[in-house]
Amino acid sequence: MPPMQKKLKTSVIHNGDSVKLLNDSAPESVDLIIADPPYNIGYEYDVYNDNRSDNEYLQWSKQWISACTRVLKQDGAFWIAIGDEYAAELKIIADDCGLKLRNWVIWYYTFGVHCTNKFSRSHTHFLYFVRNTSSVKFNADDVRVPSARQLIYKDLRANGTGKLPDNTWILRPQDIGDDVYFENQDTWYIPRIAGTFKERADFHGCQLPEQLLGRIIKSCSNVGDVVLDPFAGTGSSLVTAKKLNREWVGIELSPEYATHATARIQATDVGDALDGAPEPITGSQRTATRPKRTPTPEGLDEEKLIAAFQAVPGTRSVDALIADPVLNQQFIDQCSKLRLPGTPYNWNKCLLSMRKSGLYPQLRGRKSQSDFKWSAADPYEFACEMALRRAIDAGYFALDDLLCDPEAAARFDANCRTLCPGYSAFQYRWTALNLRKRVDDWSDTQECDEVLQLGEPEPLLKAKCLSSPAVYLIEANAEKPAFAGFTHDMEGRLEITKQAFKALLQWMPQHGEWTIRIARGKSLKGNEGRINQRRIVRERRPRLNFLSDRENDQSTVNAG
């Protein structure tokens, strides 16, 4: 009877031959494989011949792809980076090994590729395979990005702006389903590593950027999953996997590379920011437009826009129409019927700007759709604040821009629902609007009768408390505050937070035990609880709290 095969030990780079080590390992034991093999273009490695004959290279490629497929789980993902010369051949080899191509992606870059007497090499192919198309792990919300149109134009016909960078990742979809990545997106903008970049290792000429690797890891694996790099090189993929709180394992033929990569990984902590510039969300300057009293696309009839608003039954305010997805869809339908130029974002944004200008009596004097009560929102308001901060970190610097974009607003809803399900999209959005309106009042440095002191840290998942108003601080560790909150019912909030813990780990990966520090007030009057909460936010700057302009300014002053 053959000996039982063991899984490759994680958190280590194994020095040796990938084919042999993988064939000796337990099958179906890896969640994600990122392979950046030698391209066979004559690059000088210390122990590998990168100038084989075509037949030799393809025969060897079939061996390592087969070995990788063997250890890949049924719901796992397998990404291969390769140059032009063998991209098509490796796709055919992978097909023969039983893999299914899910996407063919091209990472396109343009600097550092000067060539003479021929066109320059300016891209790398990324082939994304799965074993089982009916069981695919894909975290779409973690990798949604602006379209090229959004980045190139900052006139009012696009939501978000910017200059097209020199280095882009171009997506070529293959049979994309509704759940797959980048609805209406075709371009990733991820800078290539230049010689001056901090993340570049000392001696490897073929590194991939951490931002690029991070997108692959976040989209195709979950916290705690095993990520394998069978050609570890200087360890960039493994460094990125560790930062994102994945288990990692590498194989490297060169002892020198293995030693260097191990040192890089040991100097990395879980939760560290990915090196390199992320994809730009907005541009720096807006393209020129004629001065108008409202930012309307050319040819947009304001009277028709108002007519579309008035045609929606049950609407009592512009803000409510923007925040309510049902009413907003009816408004968009009316705009479409009237053949208004622009997009749903344009129509929403223009209507909101018209209301704020005070120049349109038809949009004034309507009562709010609901009388908002913080006590009613208490069970889920923390989720709204965290989701709002997540959207801001993604580049939506104004809540108005977020809510005026139906797709972005839907992602905000999904993030809220992940943390605290059971409430409507309107409730989540309306709470975020009220938070934005009130946070500066709560952030005031005015005196309050009771300045609360946080208690000693307790393990978050084991903590217990009575039902009473309280201010609290959740910490991933003593140096990484996650969220400061206020609640009328600390017992209920604690239970909801425990249920949301898995989602919190996705947003803020961190090894070790999370803790909570609770400050209970004797009698919190008026806004005293909120003022104490915002004081903690201002002083500690938790990663998942919404920061008002005033808090940002005060934090900068305090830090200085």
Image: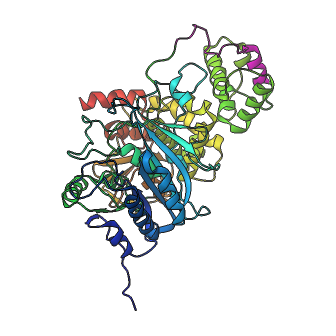
Residue 494 visible to the viewer: no
Q: Nearer the viewer, residue 321 or 558?
A: 321
Q: How is the image coloured?
A: rainbow
Q: Residue 513: x, y in percent? A: 34, 61
Judged left or right of residue 147, residue 222 is left
Q: Residue at x 33, y 58 (%)?
A: 231
Q: Is residue 483 above or below residue 343?
A: below
Q: Nearer the viewer, residue 459 or 42?
A: 42
Residue 147 visible to the viewer: yes
Q: Nearer the viewer, residue 8 or 426?
A: 8
Q: Is residue 150 above or below residue 223?
A: above
Q: Is residue 515 magenta?
A: no
Judged left or right of residue 419, residue 532 is left
Q: Residue at x 21, y 46 (%)?
A: 203
Q: Is residue 257 above or below residue 336?
A: below
User: In the rendered view of the protein, which quadrant contains the N terminus?
Assistant: bottom left
Q: Residue at x 46, y 48 (%)?
A: 126
Q: Residue 303: x, y in percent? A: 76, 14
Q: Nearer the viewer, residue 503 or 314?
A: 503
Q: Residue furthest top?
A: 291
Q: Residue 365: x, y in percent? A: 71, 19
Q: Residue 305: x, y in percent? A: 74, 19
Q: Residue furthest bottom?
A: 1
- Quadrant location of residue 189? top left
User: In the rendered view of the protein, which quadrant contains the C terminus?
Assistant: top left
Which range of residues does the magenta coloring cover? 288-310
Judged left or right of residue 366, residue 165 is left
Q: Is residue 296 magenta?
A: yes
Considering the whole magenta stretch, tell me its main secondary structure. Answer: loop
Count of numbered badges drawn on the protein: 0
